[in-house]
Image: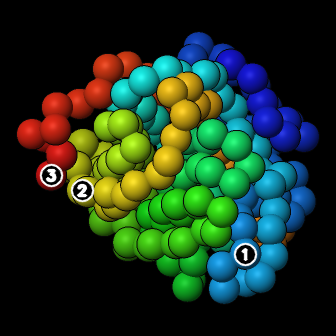
Amino acid sequence: MAWLNEPPSWSVDGGVLRAVTGPRTDFFRQTFYGWTTDNGHFFHRPVTGDFTAEVRVSASYTTRFDQAGMMVRADERTWLKSGVELTSGALHVGTVLTDGWSDVSMAPVTGAAADTTIRVTRFGDALAVHCRAGDGPWQLLRLGHLDLPGTVDVGVMCCSPEGAGLEATFRDLRIGPPMSRENLE
């Protein structure tokens, strides 16, 4: 695996990745805020074809828009990120789908936010995003279209758009065959 925008501090020990974000880092393009940034931290590997990827994430969310989760990326204009984010004074799971322009959807985190698993599945040009708190049930967050090449980069991301120093921990990262379409909901 490799970094796009390596964070100032990170380590891997026993399959657990820990990273500390740099200042004013994010992935976002235009919509609403009018700015483009592509300097968030993304630890990834190439994946060809359909897949399901999931990871357990926890972090020390302290500053508005601090976030940690997963990313699927073709290039700087075509990507999806989804993770736990501090917004409106509470933790939410945010998903940003970007095809030239970013759009954002948010859902409140139900249950133990300190132990949230994010799962992204690719079915051709469709991406499905699920999350669950602890060992709770999976919740479908997003099903969207993204025109993707055959091989994309898949992995974990963390950002601090309005600060720095978010301490993010990623456990149990798995990337494998896609889940069954029948299990989408």
Point 55% across, 34% down: residue? 149
**Residue labelled with disc 3:** 185
**Residue labelled with disc 1:** 30
Q: Name the mark on residue 145.
A: none
Residue type, mark 2 in image? Gln
Residue 120 image offset from top left, x and y in percent: 40, 42
Residue nearer the viewer, 67 or 47: 47
**CB-based contact (under 8 Å), mark 1 and mark 2:** no
Residue 126 image offset from top left, x and y in percent: 36, 47
Q: Residue furthest top?
A: 14
**Comparing marks 3 and 1, which lies closer to the viewer?**
1
Residue type, mark 1 in image? Gln
| Mark 3 → mark 2, Cα distance in angstroms | 7 Å
| Mark 3 → mark 1, Cα distance in angstroms | 31 Å
| Mark 1 → mark 2, Cα distance in angstroms | 28 Å
Q: Is residue 86 left or right of residue 26?
A: left
**Residue labelled with disc 2:** 139
Residue 144 image offset from top left, x and y in percent: 37, 58
Q: Is residue 68 visible?
A: no
Q: Residues within 10 Å of mark 3 (few under 14, many from 20)?
A: few
Point 62% across, 51% down: residue? 78
**Comparing marks 3 and 2, which lies closer to the viewer?**
3
**Nearer-N-terminus badge (3/1):** 1
Residue type, mark 3 in image? Glu
